[in-house]
Image: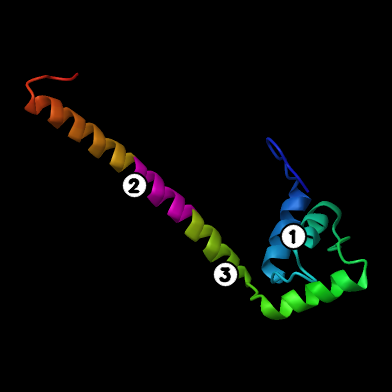
Amino acid sequence: MEIRGRVRVSKIEQQRIERFVAAARYDIAVNNCEHFAYYVVHGLALSTQQHTWWKDLSAKTIRILQPTQSKRSNISDAIGREVGNVLNENLRQSRIRNANQERIAFWDARGLRLE
């Protein structure tokens, strides 16, 4: 499912999102992103990607090797990303301020006043 621009989520879709996130742990074979998207839109967790035996076998192999996440892990990861984004933006702003102060100090030392 590809979405561009503003997304309008109905009340029932929001409830489905919350139910899926609360109940399902990510699993490439039975709870992957396609299952999630289809469930939100249609109310059934289906995936069209596993209609052949080799895709099903591949998914099951990856499922064995790949760790899964609980709802708490999903939320913790999302919060961690948001906190990281805020900290990175704060760091970027601080570097800009420091660079501007250094530029002003450089020209002040040479007798030129920048305004």
Residue farthest toward the front in the current orientation of the protein: 110
The C terminus: image quadrant: top left
Q: Decide which of 62, 93 is in the foreground and name it.
A: 62
Q: Which residues are magenta?
A: 82-92
Marks 3/2: CA–CA distance: 26 Å
Residue at the spot 68% in from the left edge and 64% down from the top edge: 21
Marks 1/2: CA–CA distance: 33 Å
Q: Residues within 10 Å of mark 3 (few under 14, many from 20)?
A: few
| Sequence-wise first label, 1 or 2 | 1
Q: Which mark is residue 91?
A: 2
Residue at the spot 86% in from the left edge and 69% down from the top edge: 55
Give the prevailing secondary structure in the magenta stretch. Answer: helix
> Where is residue 19, by image quadrant?
bottom right
Residue farthest toward the right in the current orientation of the protein: 52
Is residue 96 positioned above or below 31 on the image? above
Is residue 115 positioned above or below 71 on the image? above
| Amino acid, disc 3 | Ser
| Sequence-wise first label, 3 or 1 | 1
Residue 11, position in %: x, y? 74, 48
Judge depth for marks 3 and 2 and give the one in front.
2
Residue 91, position in %: x, y? 34, 47
Contact (CB < 8 A) between labels 3 and 1? no
Q: Is residue 33 left or right of residue 115?
A: right
Determine if the magenta segment contains residue 96. Answer: no
